[in-house]
Image: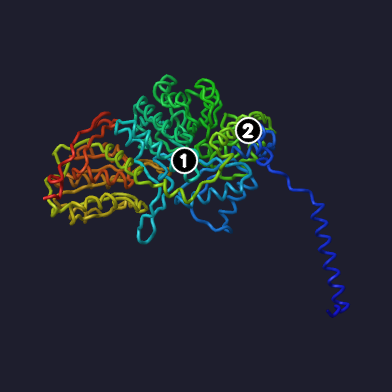
Amino acid sequence: MRPLPPAHRVGLTALLLTLAACATATRTRPAAPVSTSAVCAGQAASDQWVDCVLSHLTLREKAAQMVWPQLYGDYVPADAAAWRRLSDDVAQQKVGGLIMSIGSPLEIAAKLNALQRQSDLPLLVGADLETGAGFRARGGYFLPNGIDLGGAVIFPPEMALGATGDTTFAYEEGRITALEGRALGIQIAFAPVLDVNNNPANPVINTRSYGEDPAAVARFGVAFIHGLQANGMIATGKHFPGHGDTGVNSHLALPVVNASRARLDSVELVPFRAAIAAGVGAIMTFHGAMPALDSTGVPGTLSHAVLTDLLRKQLGFDGLVITDAMDMRGVVDMFGATEAIKRAVAAGADVLLMPADVPGAIDAVVAGVREGRYDEARLDRSVRRLLAMKRSLGLVHNRFVDLDSARAVVGDSAHAAVAQLAAERSITLVKDSLGQIPLGRLTPGARVLSVTYARRTDLAAGVAFDAELRRAFPALHSTFVNSDDPAPNFWPVLQSADSADMVIVSSYISQGSTVTSVAAPRAFVDFVEELQRRGRHPIVVALGNPYLLQQIPDVSAYLIAWGGFPVSQRAAARALLGAAPITGQLPISIPPVVQIGVGAKRPALPSSARAGSR
């Protein structure tokens, strides 16, 4: 081989010297710190794992265990800002858990697996699974075609289960929710709602509650808790000490419940006492004030009198105390985000859910210690509960889920059949003064008009309902009216109604995080009253707010389906057609029109006598 020219030899020598220097630097560089998870891995099989981990966490790492950011189950590439933020929250900020919002099932599972891989300690993941895993884990709709992308099983709202009168459905919902949720990597359900909905004007609870009878709410809530926790998921009773008697949405402002302590003991606290006795694993707080419990006027989330004196000491609860979202106006408006975080910790909260600024929330918890608002031992108590829950759920040994196995569990047809049966048993016939229900007298050629009144963004509204009706009435005429339109043009609808044999008006107006009132707009009320005046005798189906009857008390037929999910739409249509019996009873009163317990019964019709069969 020919020798290298002198200039090349000099260059090669420099390169070799550089490589040697790098190798030396690598040998002398301090080793990366061993993770807490690795240090304590040998004790994972014993209770000592909690003590080991706790002893190795810094003050800021302890604070981070208490802060849980929100994420979506949507697809994002690795270089997207949303993914970089989540990665930072987990890998650098070292948060202790997450709250999963909406998304498709497998994307939720895959994203949680990826974040679990980035986390030193296992993450706890919670989600608002109030009506099953499908409440959050659904694929949505593909536009512009409106294709339903499917997802996990979704049950009708809690009030619908209350209308069945059968706590078996609540247990089964808990069982199925646990199986499907755990298959997706979610370990905590922020459910059941234990609020007693004794205020018809409540804009945020409404059908999310089992009803207005405290004892019934307690029975259904306990059944759900048993079904959920017996199958590997932690239940969360909410919103302590009670969000039912409010006319203000805590997402938007601070509600105040001016009830006496005696009333709170006999109504609002009844379901929570029962849940605690049943071993509920977590309690979520109420962003509202109750002067009878704390005269300072602060929301329960920030009240030591509520979270420590009442919940911990008087009621004996020793599970996780989880705040409602810390970005809601009910807590932020009064004190600001940073001060609200400190007050929540001082009050006794273990988990600070959904702060707008995750690093800032962690810093606020640490600052509270340094300012003497609480000591580090206060944080230790919360972190110990969190670590013990992670260990009890088996996350120390396996924090991941098998994506291939999820498809065998999530959305299973047997699970869906239970949800469908629950929806059918919940259908409640409140009024039928002309004996119109079921529609057995109508032939397949009958001119049936189905009017869907819903928000334009509610892509599912009326779809399953009309599809089921169209099986019996192929010539069904469907029309959609946008409830967000302040002055909708009902004139064409009235003209269609004049030539119809039957008019069915379905309302999907419901509660929500941005809703200030569940009352129907005056234009809608006038439309229904005009149908009545014209002698069209519409059947009104409430697939949202069940208290709608207060505004249209003279309607001749009023059926409550409790929710706008496809499962409830199909159940309502089958009830109207006589394909399923009607057996539901009101778990609420609709003052001053009807009392609690009302519900006319209708048997299912033989197939030969059903609507559209002749």
* Numbered tag placed on residue 251 in the rendering: 1
Location of residue 248 (image quadrant): top left
Q: Is residue 596 above or below residue 249?
A: above
Q: Is residue 305 above or below residue 106?
A: above
Amino acid type of the residue that numbered disc 1 sits on in the rendered structure: His
Horizontal and vertical percent for residue 143? Answer: 38, 60
Where disc 1 sits, the SS reads: loop
Mark 1 packing: few (<14 Cα in 10 Å), some, or many (20+)? Answer: many
* Numbered tag placed on residue 50 in the rendering: 2
Residue situated in front as seen by the camera: 497 or 156: 156
Residue situated in front as seen by the camera: 244 or 30: 30
Location of residue 226 (image quadrant): top left
Horizontal and vertical percent for residue 154? Answer: 37, 44
Amino acid type of the residue that numbered disc 2 sits on in the rendered structure: Val
For the image shown, how many numbered marks are present on the structure? 2
* Numbered tag placed on residue 380 in the rendering: none
Q: CA distance from mark 1 to mark 2?
A: 35 Å
